[in-house]
């Protein structure tokens, strides 16, 4: 059975995405040419593959985040941005909630959604292996760093 493509009508104007050549086309960011000029949360290495900084994208940030063994971010949130994440390699923990008493753990292949304005702390659970995430945000990579909490105030962090 052939799919009904009639409901996918082209509507709207995408001319704002024209390249200098005048063509509206996909924009490829080659591996190794990602943009490192992005906000951070104290030690997370974020690079963007698709962002307003180096593509015609206006409402999307998509990049890779790397954390060294034992890394823990400062307390932060992502403003109005909805955030989606995918663990490429390693084991992660996100602390959240009042006084950051709650957490979720993730491993390679897991996906996560972090709601807008939700204060949290991102962690690499391993003391020996790096953690790598793919992350996307709309409208872009907003990072608002907050007053931090002590390691000993994070349940199960020191004994992981």
Image: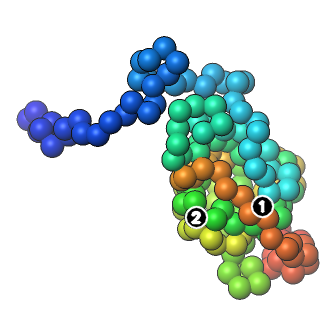
- In the image, 135 versus 101, the foreground residue is 135
Give the crowd class for mark 1: few <14, some 14-19, many >=20 residues within 10 Å.
many
- In the image, 119 versus 13, the foreground residue is 13
Answer yes or no: do the residues labelled 2 and 1 have beta carbons within 8 Å?
A: no
Looking at the figure, which quarter contains the N terminus?
top left
Residue name at image x 15 percent, y 36 percent: 5
Residue 95, position in %: x, y?
A: 72, 72
- Image position of 20 (left or right of 33): left
Looking at the figure, which quarter contains the C terminus?
bottom right
Residue name at image x 65 percent, y 51 percent: 141
**Farthest-out residue, left:** 1
Q: Is residue 86 above or below residue 21?
A: below
Residue 123: mark? 1
Residue 29, position in %: x, y?
A: 60, 25
Upstream in sequence: badge 2 or badge 1: 2
Q: CA–CA distance between discs 2 and 1? A: 22 Å
**Farthest-out residue, bottom:** 98
Q: Is residue 109 something that shows in the picture?
A: no
Residue 80: mark? 2
């Amino acid at each position: 059975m052939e799919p009904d493509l009639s409901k996918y009508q082209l509507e709207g104007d995408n001319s704002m995405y024209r390249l200098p050549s005048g063509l509206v086309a996909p924009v490829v960011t080659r591996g190794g040419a990602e943009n490192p000029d992005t906000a951070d949360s104290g030690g997370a290495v974020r690079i963007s593959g698709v962002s307003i900084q180096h593509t015609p994208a206006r409402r999307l940030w998509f990049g890779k985040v790397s954390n060294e063994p034992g890394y823990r971010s400062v307390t932060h949130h992502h403003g109005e941005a909805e955030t989606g994440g995918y663990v490429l390699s390693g084991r992660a923990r996100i602390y959240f909630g009042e006084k950051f008493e709650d957490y979720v753990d993730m491993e390679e292949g897991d996906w996560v959604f972090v709601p807008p304005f939700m204060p949290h702390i991102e962690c690499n659970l391993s003391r020996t292996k790096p953690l790598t995430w793919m992350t996307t945000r709309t409208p872009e990579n907003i990072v608002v760093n907050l007053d931090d909490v002590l390691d000993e105030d994070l349940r199960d962090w020191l004994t992981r």
